[in-house]
Amino acid sequence: METKYYIAVHRDDKVWKRSSSGGAFSAITDAWLAAYGEKASIYGCAFDGELNALHIRATTAAERNQMCGSKYIGSNTTGVYRDVARDLQNGMHVCFSGTPCQIGALKSYLRVAGIQPEDRLLTVDFICHGVASTRFFRDYLDVLEKKYGSKAISCTFRAKSRPERRQDIQVGFANGKSFLSRSTRYDWFYAVYFRNLNLRPACYGCRYASEQRCADITIADHWDVKTFYDKAKSLLLVSTPLGELWTQKALADMDWTEVQHQAQTSIQSRKPGDYDAFWKTYLEQGYFAAQKLVGNNTLAGKAKYHLVSLADDLHILSALKKIRILLRR
Ligand SMILES: Cc1cc2nc3c(=O)[nH]c(=O)nc-3n(C[C@H](O)[C@H](O)[C@H](O)COP(=O)(O)OP(=O)(O)OC[C@H]3O[C@@H](n4cnc5c(N)ncnc54)[C@H](O)[C@@H]3O)c2cc1C
Ligand code: SF4
């Protein structure tokens, strides 16, 4: 079928707040749970107690809620495709969410196992910039744990505490303290992630970054400068009749509009020129040396971060952002 595109935002504020964009994932999986009850299972990425990302299985909304929110690191899927196969063989209705390459891997697994799930398997992927090295993320957390004197117990890559910020990392610690990154540009995780320096090798020139989607439904962020201060919205791309059926059910919980073709599906992340130098430094000299190489762990980098933090405290950053957005409209 010809791809259909929707922009949507969940009506329930609580759901919207825990989601990275407009809450499409929750709306789709709520509809799935409501339709199939005890015969429904949902697979997606959650954090364990050590903040490792891994795929889990859920049969209730509470379990599913652990999957909400983007984790920008690779998710461990060990044994998960086998579990999906077992669910399907037992007559369950499975909604599987993950990166496009995970959807591709699941479909290959089922094909080899001779399982034809028909409409008992709904696949949901997202437009994928790439996943970062888990080792790098662990080093990022270790530094914060030392600074805050406590174990990191939660991490939100897309905290929605400030309307003008779409990429705030928030880390919660066992002692009740919490870290909120001051600036995407100078945050020690995002500064490296958005320069594509710490993505998994397979993410560069990813073959799944294409208009031809592997999943029934693709969810993504809808960025629009005109509505930047409105609630973050989801973009849904629907590629199959099964996807359209469940999208329509999900949209019942959302404010939505159907739109024309959106071009962002085929953007591939490129390997930057300083990739090899970055990894050589990181592997041979460690995290701080790698951060120094990208300009974070230097006197100038630290001074900039402190200046940005001060400007943030004085609300100068949000004022500048508002002016920039007004000028771009
Ligand atoms: C690594 C990554 C890169 C992304 N890159 C882009 C991009 O370049 N452009 C864009 O428009 N959108 C991107 N997204 C998608 C976007 O950020 C939202 O995740 C998506 O719009 C869903 O938001 P939501 O509000 O519907 O629900 P949410 O509740 O935020 O959805 C969470 C969903 O993401 C899945 N998920 C979270 N982390 C992972 C992970 N590490 N591995 C596999 N599945 C995961 C969960 O299983 C669940 O299905 C990316 C997401 C991730 C995780
Ligand atoms: S960019 Fe491609 S290879 Fe990397 S996680 Fe996303 S889908 Fe997989």
Image: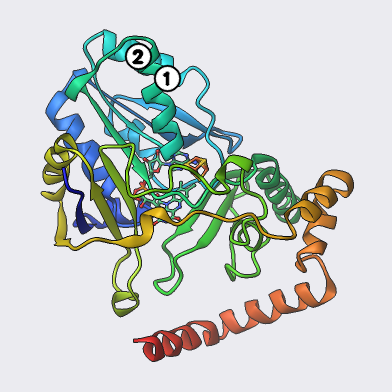
- What is the quadrant of residue 233 in the picture? bottom left
Q: What percent of the width, then of the height, locates residue 291?
A: 78, 59
**Which residue position is annotated with label 1?**
81
Q: CA distance from mark 2 to mark 1?
A: 6 Å
Residue at the (17%, 37%) spot, across then down: 31
- What is the quadrant of residue 294 in the picture? bottom right
Q: Taking 66 as reference, is 88 left or right?
A: left
Q: What percent of the width, then of the height, locates residue 114?
A: 32, 9
- Please identify the residue farthest to the right as the structure is shown: 285
Q: What percent of the width, then of the height, locates residue 32?
A: 19, 32
The amino acid marked with disc number 2 is Ala
The amino acid marked with disc number 1 is Tyr
Position of the N terminus, as image quadrant, is top left
Q: Residues within 10 Å of mark 1 (few under 14, many from 20)?
A: many
For the residue pair 311 and 222, the one nearer the viewer reads as 222
Circle 1 SS class: helix
Q: Are marks 2 and 1 in contact (CB under 8 Å)?
A: yes
Q: What percent of the width, then of the height, locates residue 148?
A: 70, 54
32 above or below 158?
Answer: above
28 above or below 229?
Answer: above
Could you say which disc has been placed on residue 85 in the image? 2
Position of the C terminus, as image quadrant, is bottom left
Q: Taking 303 as reference, is 99 left or right?
A: left
Q: Residues within 10 Å of mark 2 (few under 14, many from 20)?
A: many
